[in-house]
Each structure stands twice: as C-alpha cells, then as structure tokens.
Image (tube, rainbow, N blue to C red):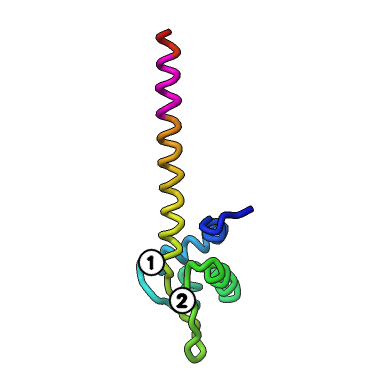
Amino acid sequence: MVNKGSPTKSFRALGSSARTSIIERLSREGTLTTSDLSKTLRISLPATLKHTKILEQAGLIQREKRNRAQYCSIHPEKLDQALEWLLIQKIFWDVSLSRLEKHITYKKHI
C-alpha cells in the first residue's frame, strides 16, 4: 500500500532522462511550449507530449493550452514533497548507521 504522502508518482515520472531534462529545463527557463521542449530534447513532438502528460499526471508540471500551443511550467510543490521524503529517509539511515557503528565498536572492545 502506498502512503498518501509518498512521492511514488513523482519518482516514477522522473524515471526517464527525457522527463528529468524537461524538469531541469523548466526549472531554469520558466514556462516553455512543448514545441520548444521538443526541439531542445531532440525528440518528436508526440513523444514530448507523452512525457509532459506523465509529468502533469504526477503533479510535477502544469500544462496550459493557449491558441495552438501548449505551455508547460514547473509545479515546485511536488518536487518539494519528494525532497522532504528523501531528507526523512536520509536522516533515518544516518541515525541507524551511526547506531550500528557504535554497537560494532562497543562489541569490538568487549
């Protein structure tokens, strides 16, 4: 069962180098059209649309159609949630490994 606060969708969406490139580009440059993204990524427009749809479904970006163009922008709140989850995991493992190291050191001196 997936925890409601789990960033599973975000991580799944970021499992593609094309999608991470889209996130990086939107983070650096702000709102861009799917056509602009397609040219930079050197992938077809239909493939870019597929990737942006997956990112939108994960809540990482927003897409807005204006006239004939589709504009994409970053949705940083979901990225912040994923980062928070990673930091919690890091703290857990840092503490656990520190305790293990102390236990091993203690056992060596007995």
What residue sits 47% from the left and 88% below the top?
66
Q: Between residue 85 and residue 27, name the one nearer to us.
A: 85
* Along the line of sight, the residue nearer the viewer: 63 or 78: 78
- Residue at (56% x, 60% y) in the render: 9
Residue at (41, 59) in percent of width and height = 80
Which residue is disc 2 drawn over? 72
Rate crowding at label 2 as few (under 14), some (14 to 19) or many (20 or more) other CA atoms within 10 Å.
many
> Overall secondary structure of the magenta stretch?
helix
| Quarter of the C terminus within the rendering | top left
Disc 2 from disc 1: Cα separation: 11 Å
Count the labels in the image: 2
Q: What's the amino acid at mark 1?
A: Ser
Q: On the image, numbered disc 1 is attached to which residue?
A: 27
**Secondary element type, mark 2:** strand
Q: Which residues are magenta?
A: 98-106
Seen from the viewer's position, the closer of residues 44 and 17 is 17
The correct choice, above or below, for 69 with respect to 101 in the image is: below
In the figure, residue 15 lies in which quadrant? bottom right
Q: Is residue 43 magenta?
A: no
* Residue 104 is inside the magenta segment: yes
